[in-house]
Amino acid sequence: MPFTLEQFEILSEKTLLFLFILKKDGKIVAFNNRCEVLFPMDKSEIKGKYITDYIIDEDVPIFKDSVCCLSDKNRMINESFSFPSGKDGVLSLKFDFTLHNNLIYAAGIDTTKEYKEHRALLTISKLTKTGAWYFNPKNNEMYWSKGCYLIKEADPNISMTREKGASFYPKDSRARVENYLDTLIKEKRPYEYTEKIITEKGNEKWVKVVGQPVIYKNEVIFVNGTIADVTDRHNYIERLKYSEETKHLALKGIQSGLFDHHIAKNEVFYSIDFKKMLGLPLDQDFVAEKEFTKMIHPDDLKDANQRHIKNLNQEGNHYYNHYRLKHLQGGFRHYEVYGFRRKNKKGETTRMIGNLIDVHQKKINERTIVESKNRLQAMVNNGFAYTVLLNTKGEILMTDDKSVKIIERDFKVNPNKVQSRFIDVMPLNFKNSFAHEFNEALKGNIVKKEIERITHNGNTQWLESKYTPILDQEKTVNSVLVSFHDITEQKLAEIAIKESHIKEQELNSLKSNILSNFSHEIRTPLNGIMTVSRLLLDEDKAEEREKLLEYLEESKNRLLNTINNLSNFSEIEAIRNNLNLQEIDTNYTVETSFREYKHMAEAKRLLYQLELDQACPQINVDEDLFRTALNNIIHNAIKYTNTGSIIIKIKSEKSKNNVYISITDTGIGIDKENLKKIFDPFMQESIGLSRKYEGTGMGLSLSKRYIEILDGKIKVKSKIGKGTEFKIIIPKCL
């Protein structure tokens, strides 16, 4: 059965496919919502654009060629294209194109992951000069990846066979190479070999080939393999295989600081430049070790001898030592010794060849750096509240003692001793904006930002952060100084002034509301009483007098209710101290209030329901106080609901400690701003002469205070035009 138009529209918008309708020149006619992630603009601006405007440059020619291939004879093709994405970098989609009535219908699926893996494999293949291949012994099918063709400098469009692959090896090694594969198929064991090849362009290369069998029921059904260009490695190893004569020539070429120490003879051969550098006799080829040790600084002699003995006895062949030596021009200079030891069969060092390097200037530079760092550290420790010096990777180069203590306490690491990224050891609320500020500083911009944080002691602290780029001699940013200045006192003063201003405005508004509400709520019933009283004096008909008496009663009750509310609100503390607590049945009490207002709900033709709790939970409350609070909320729900329903529910089974009473209506609702104020006394959502509903605005405020006196809570949630839900939470009798 074919899809209906409605079904097709639903399918096109709910599918994960990217659906397009294009003209043959690539102009976009229509697309589904899934395609919106491909465009950096509003979808209303897309129609009429060309899809090639959003495809990455290298894929545009492929798209144009593919579209040209579509015709009445060739109505369907498929091809992959990539789109730039700010979040993911690149989105890759594989499309099926169908030509119909001179329009192209395109359906694409997301192949980004496969695209990234494919590009990564190609990149690795190029960087490491590797390729993959497989062979099917059943039908002699041979496949090479692009990397195999690159290594052998062959045309990738030529289909590959086993015989063609073997032809790249020299004739004298082809039989051996062929045997590797035959042996693998026969013995079912992997192989690995390194052989020379001659590429298509006539170049000599060395390749390492690995083959791995795939076995099914004890038979090789497939062979997977890799090939790697190891020409550089092979040539390097060959160069290492030089003769003893080459070694001597190499040593002869190293003049500066060269020595040859014969351990058994206790003699040291020094090169001419070595002897000139240290002022040793030029007419002696060999100098006794004692003569050399006399030149070592007395303070370094003991440690140098200990390192020397330890070096001669340790495993391996390398030697390292360092000390100060007397210089030809007077004074002492720093030197480092690097050597290679030859051992006998017992593992004893018999000879050592090495080089002496003058590192005196290096030591001076290191000492200068340390002294400068100490000075800078002293400045850092006595500067801003917190200071951190970062390199361009965001790693901490230096920080002050106070910051170190905080980081050690929270992250168990000393950033002045262990390399740490600042983002890994900063407070959580610093991380939101760090990357942006740091990147701006790397561009050469000074950035300031205020940050609020909670200290280890639970106090609030305000900091002004400043990111300052530090430039080298070439005016390039080589580090960023991040400083934090404590502005807590300043910020608290600003907040106090602001709160004081807001409080003043609230008090003025409250005063206006009180005057407006009470002026209205007292004047209106008084006007009613006065008017009805005058009418009663002149009215003779019994029926009319009866109605006027009812109006008089309503005005009286309204005036009395207003005065009672005001009285109750002013006597909260007295009520708190004179509670009459007793254990009552929640179902019974709520049902009593429910019945009391049933006539009001029915008069407005509202759906008015009560859902009792089968567990019949008991609560310990002052019944009058509890019922007053509940009545106010039910009355309000009916008052502000013109159509729909009022649903009252009692639930306790999901809580061990509390009973939940919810009053849900479908009334006018309360907006977010007024939702915060509904429990404030004398407040209504509509006030003054323009208000739509009568009342002092104290009912909910009294309800909240009464429930809180009974150790309960009131919660509320609402949506404008949708309704409101009040939830009373009262502790159970346990």
Image (tube, grey):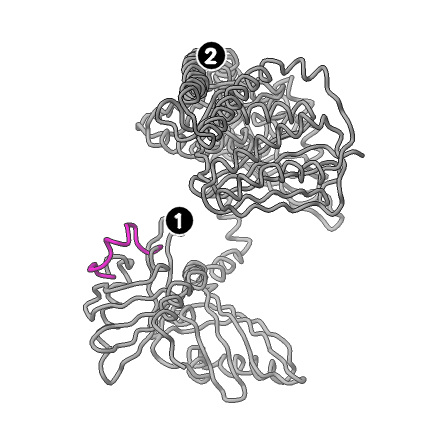
Q: Residue at x 61, y 19 (%)?
A: 297
Percent from the top left, x then y, of residue 541? 43, 29
Q: Are marks 1 and 2 in contact (CB under 8 Å)?
A: no
Which mark, residue 163?
Answer: none
Q: In the rendered structure, which segment of residues is drawn in magenta?
A: 37-51
Quarter holding the C terminus is: top right
Disc 2 crowd rating (10 Å Cα; few below 14, some 14-19, many 20+) is few
Which mark, residue 87?
Answer: 1
Q: Determine which residue is flagged by label 2.
A: 496
Q: Is residue 89 above or below residue 417?
A: below
Image-quadrant location for residue 445: top left
Residue 270 shown in magenta: no
The type of residue carrying mark 1 is Lys
Q: Is residue 371 visible?
A: no
On the rendered structure, is 688 left or right of 266? Answer: left
Closest to the camera, between mark 1 and mark 2, is 2
Label 2's element? Answer: helix
The type of residue carrying mark 2 is Ala
Viewer-proximal residue among 96 and 523: 523
Percent from the top left, x then y, of residue 654? 71, 44
